[in-house]
């Protein structure tokens, strides 16, 4: 029996792309820890990390070393299997969700390859569904952590996370349906390419943020809630829950939760860039210049900075305010946006 395998250069290219994405996400998480500390200090008129390496750049690596050598504690009454499975679920889903996100146009790597290689671990025609299917599984790790810890604070944090996800998941999904209608595709690559067309005579400017401004705001707001970031960080609200679902975790098990949160931030920002901000396209910059991946990373970086900015600007909502905002404001707004988009495509051919 013979199996049809891709040519060796394609296989090696896919392996290389996998390693690039894997290491890139890990270093992006470390970089975001440094950025968040420095920007938080700047906004509060402090200095931030300066001692460990130039400008404190080695501080994230010092944190990793500290966590590696800390004692890994587990409550005596905790469920051992689920206690250690929970952070693995969170970290695994965080990495897997990024596997179908394209980060640039196909390239031959300056002529080293005979055929262009896609800057994407896996290209599937329903990439949008894959991202949301995998990302929504991450809440199981949080709920498992809260329940398996056998702690009331942890359990409340896990329950809060599940209620929060249910409140925002509908708006989160419906906010991007308008983009799917405009692009007539669920492939992230095809959605990005559709935004490379001209708008009002400006080349490569048909970004869906201009055609779907309300959808973009809903998507970004629900994405912040989905990643449990302030002002929607109810699962780990220190004032009420000590630390929430990861109260009983320490050492590298806590680090996996920490890593998953920052990788989810990168994933949401990357997906938002592909869906609404034109991906690797920029006005008057032709793709032949070969800097599409730099444009993509710059847009993702801007959204990540917005994450940090929001955290240190807005206070946390009360829990009843969160539910009201999710069900009575975001959900009706996403329905109105969907109806308006469908009517625009049907009657005006947007």
Image: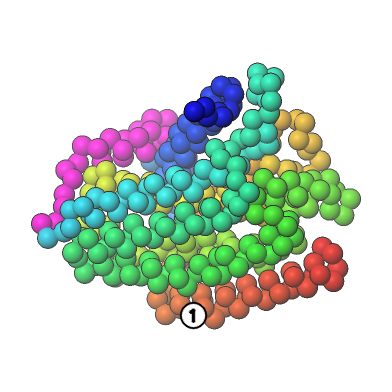
Residue 45 appears in view: no
Say which residue label 1 marks.
324
Write down the quadrant of residue 318 in the picture. Answer: bottom left
Q: Residue at x 29, y 60 (%)?
A: 144
Residue situated furthest top in the rendering: 112
**SS at circle 1:** helix
Residue situated furthest front in the rendering: 1
Write down the quadrant of residue 27 in the picture. Answer: top left
Q: Residue at x 27, y 43 (%)?
A: 252
What percent of the width, then of the height, locates residue 224? Answer: 50, 61
- Residue nearest the observer in this picture, 197 or 93: 93
Crowd rating for badge 1 (residues with CA inside 10 Å; few <14, some 14–19, many 20+):
few
- Label total for image: 1
Using residue 315 as the reference point, say whether residue 186 is left or right of it: right
Q: Residue at x 42, y 30 (%)?
A: 54
What percent of the width, then of the height, locates residue 300? Answer: 59, 46
Q: Quick check: 115 above or below 295?
A: above
Using residue 302 as the reference point, say whether residue 232 is left or right of it: left
What percent of the width, then of the height, locates residue 162? Answer: 38, 68
Q: Residue at x 69, y 25 (%)?
A: 115
Q: What stretch is highlighted in magenta?
A: 51-76
Residue 78 appears in view: yes
- Residue nearest the observer in this picture, 277 or 185: 185
Q: Quick check: 65 above or below 89?
A: above
Name the image colouring.
rainbow
For the C terminus, the quadrant is: bottom right
Q: Is residue 72 magenta?
A: yes
């Amino acid at each position: 029996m013979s199996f049809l395998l891709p040519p060796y250069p394609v296989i090696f290219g896919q392996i290389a792309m996998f390693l690039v994405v894997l290491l890139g996400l890990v270093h992006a998480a470390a970089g975001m820890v440094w950025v968040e500390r420095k920007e938080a200090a700047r906004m509060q008129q402090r200095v931030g990390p300066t001692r460990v390496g130039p400008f404190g750049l080695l501080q994230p690596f010092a944190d990793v070393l500290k966590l590696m050598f800390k004692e890994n504690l587990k409550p005596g009454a905790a469920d051992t299997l689920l206690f250690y499975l929970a952070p693995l679920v969170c970290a695994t889903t965080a990495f897997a969700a990024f596997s179908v996100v394209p980060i640039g146009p196909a390239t031959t790597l300056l002529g080293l390859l005979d055929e262009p290689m896609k800057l994407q671990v896996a290209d599937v025609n329903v990439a949008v569904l894959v991202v949301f299917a995998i990302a929504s599984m991450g809440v199981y790790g949080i709920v498992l952590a809260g329940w398996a810890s056998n702690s009331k604070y942890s359990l409340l944090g896990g329950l809060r996370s599940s209620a929060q996800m249910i409140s925002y998941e509908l708006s989160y999904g419906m906010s991007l349906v308008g983009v799917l209608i405009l692009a007539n595709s669920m492939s992230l690559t095809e959605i990005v390419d559709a935004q490379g067309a001209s708008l009002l005579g400006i080349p490569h400017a048909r970004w869906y943020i201009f055609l779907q401004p309300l959808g973009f705001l809903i998507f970004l707001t629900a994405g912040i809630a989905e990643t449990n970031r302030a002002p929607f960080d109810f699962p780990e609200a220190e004032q009420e829950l000590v630390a929430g679902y990861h109260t009983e975790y320490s050492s590298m098990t806590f680090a996996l939760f920490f890593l998953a949160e920052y990788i989810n931030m990168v994933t949401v920002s990357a997906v938002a860039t592909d869906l609404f901000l034109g991906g690797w396209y920029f006005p008057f910059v032709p793709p032949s210049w070969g800097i599409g991946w730099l444009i993509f990373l710059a847009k993702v970086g801007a959204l990540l900075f917005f994450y940090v900015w929001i955290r240190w600007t807005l206070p946390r909502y009360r829990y009843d305010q969160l539910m009201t905002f999710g069900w009575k404001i975001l959900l009706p707004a996403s329905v109105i946006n969907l109806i308006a988009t469908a009517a625009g495509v049907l009657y005006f051919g947007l």
